Image (cartoon, coloured by chain):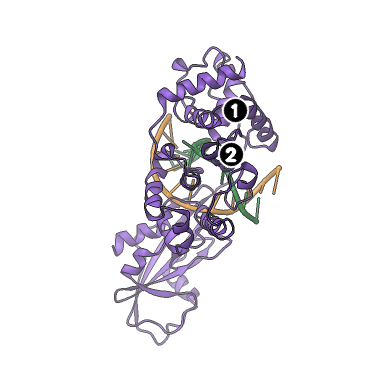
Chain colours: A purple, B orange, C green
Amino acid sequence: MNQDTFASRLIEWYEYHKRDLPWRHTNDPYHIWLSEIILQQTRVKQGLPYYQNFVKAFPTIFDLAAAPEQEVLRLWQGLGYYSRARNMQETAKAIVNQQNGSFPNSYIALVKLKGIGPYTAAAIASFAFKESVAVLDGNVFRVLARLYGLETDIATSKAKTLFSTLANQLISSDSPDLYNQAIMEFGAIQCTHSSPDCLLCPFQQECEAFLTGRQNILPIKSKKTVIKNRFFHYIVFHVQNRIAMRLRGSKDIWQGLYDFWLSENDSILDTDELVKQLDLDLSDTIYTIKAPEKAYTHLLSHQRIEARFWHIQLEEVPQSQEGLTFYTLEEVEQLPKPILINKYLSEHFF
DNA sequence: GATTCGTGGAG
DNA sequence: TCTCCAAGAAT
């Protein structure tokens, strides 16, 4: 099967099977960029409502650049990998300030931007500007590994070079946009990770994996992420209709989002032990403390967090407490928060 | 090159 | 419950 046959048969499959997705109806590089950032490591079903919300809230790159970071993160809430949102806005500002709002229009220029790597640069360059540069994402790795029976570990940089070279040989220079959309859609719908639909596959006769019965072992990926266990002891300070929230800093999860006063330990503490750790000056303050009723388990891709929430009711807002600010419930609702915090709040306050 | 960044869904 | 993954990028 030569290159043109593969590309044309793939695009033919795509035209018949493709899903109707909003970012496939625009040539606006800003909207395409939005969709690509949102869809990084994210399923279409999960990302779609976020795309619609962002387009509505920030119709142009100028709107996004002008927005407060907190507003952007609040709209991103629940999607995860929050550095995507922060980097996206940083890049929006850079494009507005340095390029007068006009989007860079080549792979080389795009890949230099914060939050835009090889995949996203290729996607934007091909979709918005018809540049003939092949995308290489999880779908493409899977489709090509199976079609050519490649057992190279796709976690390695060698594989990245190999698959990228191959993808760029297969791309249709006439329709690089359609080709890139098609190969990803093919991986997402037909050549899926588990139980691919090989019986109706247009490449059944040429697929090395199918011919040798290796659909279920290809592609080969060595990496297994080690899960770290963490124990969070949150104290929720509460005064009338106000709750103390804390902005999370860098070098840990949830940067730029808000949670509560936190004590992290390598094991579970009881209330007495936690109060001892409580370095805050509550000696002259009247308060009641309520121990947690249950534990919340929150799973991240690389961490397993076991969180417990203590509730401390105060008579009045304490004078000075480092890093803690009291917000009304209405204000808390508007702050960007991790799903774990949001879940606790919705069960106890909202 | 290995790690660190979320969350939800499938099997 | 466990594993893997889903239009990756930054450090």
In this picture, is A16 found above or below A337?
Answer: above
Q: Chain of mark 1?
A: A
Q: Nearer the viewer, mark 2 or mark 1?
A: 1
- Along the line of sight, which residue is nearer the eye, B8 or A170? A170
| Residue at point 49%, 50% (across, down) | A300
Say which mark, if any, is on residue A173.
1
In this picture, is A74 found above or below C5?
Answer: below
Q: Amino acid under label 1? A: Ser
The image quadrant that residue A21 belongs to is top left
Mark 2, Cα crowd under 10 Å, few <14 / some 14-19 / many 20+, is: many
Specify whether disc 2 shares its chain with disc 1.
Answer: yes
Identify the element where label 2 is drawn. helix
For label 2, the residue is: A122
Identify the element where label 1 is drawn. loop
- Along the line of sight, which residue is nearer the eye, A178 or A302? A178
Give the image location of residue A271, x and y in percent: 42, 70
Q: Chain of mark 2?
A: A
In this picture, is A137 found above or below A60?
Answer: above
Find the distance from the CA under tag 2 to the CA under tag 1.
13 Å
Name the quadrant of the C terminus of chain A: bottom left
Say which mark, if any, is on residue A39.
none
The image quadrant that residue A26 belongs to is top left
| Residue at point 48%, 68% (across, down) | A247
Give the image location of residue A215, x and y in percent: 54, 22
Give the image location of residue A320, x and y in percent: 46, 83
Residue that lies at the very extreme toward the top in this rendered image:
A205
- Along the line of sight, which residue is nearer the eye, A87 or A126? A126
Residue A218 seen:
no
| Residue at point 53%, 31% (across, down) | A180
